[in-house]
Image: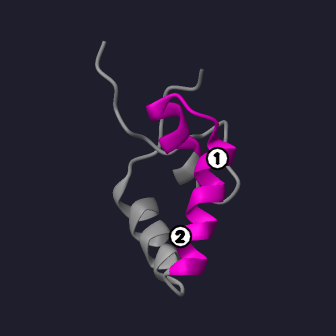
């Protein structure tokens, strides 16, 4: 089975990037969101730019599970 990184349609808060990453790596999306928030604070906002870029680049998951 091929795994594909997609933005989550069912597990989203903003655009589903963290939910999709959590589903892809089979970890809790809350941990991904927490790590992303820490990354944003430590890098003085670079996480926001990375999130926007990821939301544009990563396609949405059209297969609703």
- Decide which of 15, 29 is in the foreground and name it: 29
**Residue 57 drawn at (x, y percent):** 34, 59
Residue 24 position within the rendered picture, expressed as x and y whole percent measured from the top left:
45, 33
Queried whether the magenta region covers residue 54, the answer comes back as no
| 14 lies left or right of 26 | right
Question: What residue is shown at x 52% (from left), y 28% (from top)?
Answer: 26
What kind of element bears circle 2?
helix
Q: Earlier in the sequence, mark 1 or mark 2?
A: 1
Q: Secondary structure at mark 1?
A: helix
**Picture colour scheme:** one colour
Q: Which mark is residue 31?
A: 1
> Magenta segment range?
19-42
Q: Main secondary structure of the magenta part?
A: helix
Numbered circle sitting on residue 47: none
Tell which of 21 and 37 is nearer to you: 37
Asked if the magenta segment contains residue 30, the reply would be yes
Please name the residue that numbered disc 2 is placed on: 39
> Which residue: 45% across, 78% down?
49
Taking depth in this image into account, of 51 and 9 the one nearest to the observer is: 51
Q: Is residue 56 above or below residue 7?
A: below
Residue 58 vs residue 8: left or right? left
Residue 37 x/y as whole percent: 63, 67
17 to 8, vertically: above or below: below
Which x, y percent locates residue 3?
A: 34, 25
Q: Quadrant of the C terminus?
A: top right
User: Which residue is at a point 31% across and 12% down the rendered structure image?
Assistant: 1
């Amino acid at each position: 089975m091929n795994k594909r990184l997609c933005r989550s349609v069912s597990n989203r808060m903003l655009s589903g990037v963290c939910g999709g990453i959590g589903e892809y790596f089979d970890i809790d999306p809350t941990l991904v969101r927490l790590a992303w928030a820490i990354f944003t604070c430590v890098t003085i906002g670079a996480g926001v730019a990375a999130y926007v870029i990821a939301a544009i680049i990563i396609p949405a998951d059209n297969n609703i599970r």
